[in-house]
Image: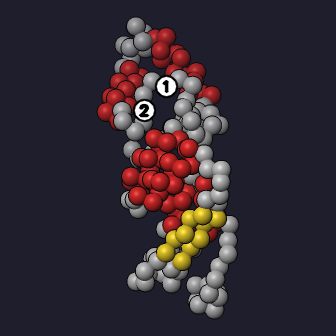
Amino acid sequence: QFRDGEIDILMATTVIEVGIDNPNATIMVIEHAERFGLAQLHQLRGRIGRGTKRSTLVAIAHAPVSEMAQKRLDFFVQTTDGFEIAEADLSLRGPGEIFGTRQSGLPQLQATRISTDQDLLVFARELVTRILTDTEASKGEYKDLITYLDRKSASATLVQAGG
């Protein structure tokens, strides 16, 4: 009904972030914007302004606003570029854990930063692939490493994204 123009105002939870595509939606108010992550604020903003009409977003924050929340809101106001938002979000929240339950913050063991060490990560992946496929390595100096990786991979579900 909202998409068809039968209803002019839609009040929703953040479920609005997914699946709503109404080119006529031009105004959004985000209440307690300080509670949302930078990426989520950007996704919410993307629900309006999909048509030819100018859109307006009002993000209302309520005191007290933490220093981290203020940084998120300041950056949110500065750009609409999704790539910049993603990088800032990663920088502000930290990478979280690859194998674990924490979704934000610094990992317990940080050997690399995903946002700045892409070359190192690609090299490490290629090196491990070579070691694991080299039959001589499994008998030689990398035997302990290969055994360790085999045990770890047997107890973890690995997800490979973007080839």
Quarter that holds the N terminus: bottom right
Query: Which residue of the protein is positioned furthest toward the bottom in this rendering?
Result: 6
Q: Nearer the viewer, residue 143 or 159?
A: 159
Name the residue rendered at 46%, 11% in the picture: 143
Up/down of 66 relative to 21, above or below: above
Residue 4, x across and y down, in percent: 58, 89
Amino acid under label 2?
Arg
Residue 12, x across and y down, in percent: 67, 71
- Residue beneath label 2, please? 113
Amino acid under label 1?
Gln
Mark 2 burial class by Cα count in 10 Å: few <14, some 14-19, many 20+: some
Name the residue rendered at 37%, 26% in the picture: 124
Q: Is residue 17 left or right of residue 133?
A: right
Q: Nearer the viewer, residue 34 or 51?
A: 34
Name the residue rendered at 58%, 39% in the picture: 104
Residue 159 visible in the current orientation: no
Which numbered marker is on residue 123? none
Mark 1 and mark 2 residues within 8 Å of each other at the beta carbon = yes
| Mark 1 element type | loop
Q: Nearer the viewer, residue 57 or 145?
A: 57
